[in-house]
Amino acid sequence: MCNSSSPSRLPLSQEIENPSSFNFSIPPPEGYPSTLVCAVGETEKSITPHAEVLVKEKKKEGKGKMVESSNKGDKRRYATRGTVQKLIGDAMVANEAQNATTLLECECTERKVKAKSHVSDLLEQQESIRRELNDLITISQGPGTSVADKEEVKRLRAENAQLLKTNATLNEEVQALNKQIIQAHVDTNNRMNLLLQSFSPHPPLS
């Protein structure tokens, strides 16, 4: 049962000047069940409906928000489903009495993907086709070889020849790019030497 006596309130002008005097706590209705909080890798926990959850806002728009707990011992981040009421400054109160908001612990993982060049991909593909070709040639030399196997060997040989041509073309392009890079470095060094000579003091004429 709620206490009928209401706490003393400040005048309206003082409340406007002192926003911290506002009381944003809304008592839950009688018989309102506790809200379940589901965390990844943990069992379900429950919090009381009238509990205030203070969080920091991560996104300015959207219903789903990434929030952080204000508890010093709790360093986890949570993603909210539903509406979270924004109050004063960065402080926010999730009103569990009106919005049964579920908090899910987010696990953020970062992976570094090693990029591979197009030439290395072609070399790996060529090596794979070469192994398949050698296996098929070994099989084709045995008795009872079907026509389909011979056609497959022929197709793989043609594909291997095409990959060899593509590989040769790419090697020529790489060599041309290396020459351009070396020439660009030489030109840059020459310009730098000219600048250094222009700024260096000239010896006096005898």
Image (spheres, rainbow, N blue to C red):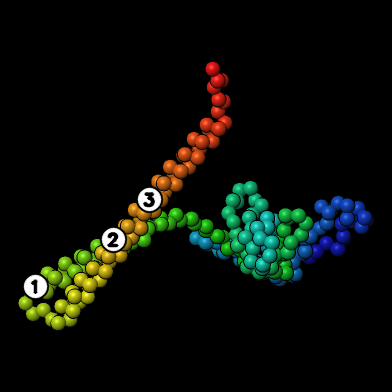
Q: Nearer the viewer, residue 27 or 82?
A: 82
Q: Residue at x 83, y 56 (%)?
A: 22
Q: Regarding mark 1 in the picture, which secondary structure is present there?
A: loop
Q: Regarding mark 3 in the picture, which secondary structure is present there?
A: helix
| Quadrant of res 149 | bottom left
Q: Is residue 46 visible?
A: no
> Residues under labels 1 and 3: Cα distance?
45 Å
Q: Residue 86 placed where, x, y %?
A: 74, 61
Among the two numbered marks 2 and 1 on one chain, the one whose residue lies closer to the N terminus = 1
> Residues under labels 2 and 1: Cα distance?
31 Å
Up the image or down, 113 lies above or below 191; here it is below
Q: Residue furthest top?
A: 206
Among the two numbered marks 3 and 2 on one chain, the one whose residue lies closer to the N terminus = 2
Q: Amino acid at mark 1?
A: Gln
Q: Nearer the viewer, residue 96 or 166?
A: 166
Q: Residues within 10 Å of mark 2 (few under 14, many from 20)?
A: few
Q: Residue 169 placed where, x, y %?
A: 31, 62
Q: Residue at x 68, y 55 (%)?
A: 56
Q: Residue 29 placed where, x, y %?
A: 75, 69
Q: Which residue is mark 3?
A: 178
Which image quadrant: the C terminus? top right
Tag of residue 141: 1
Q: Which residue is mark 2?
A: 168
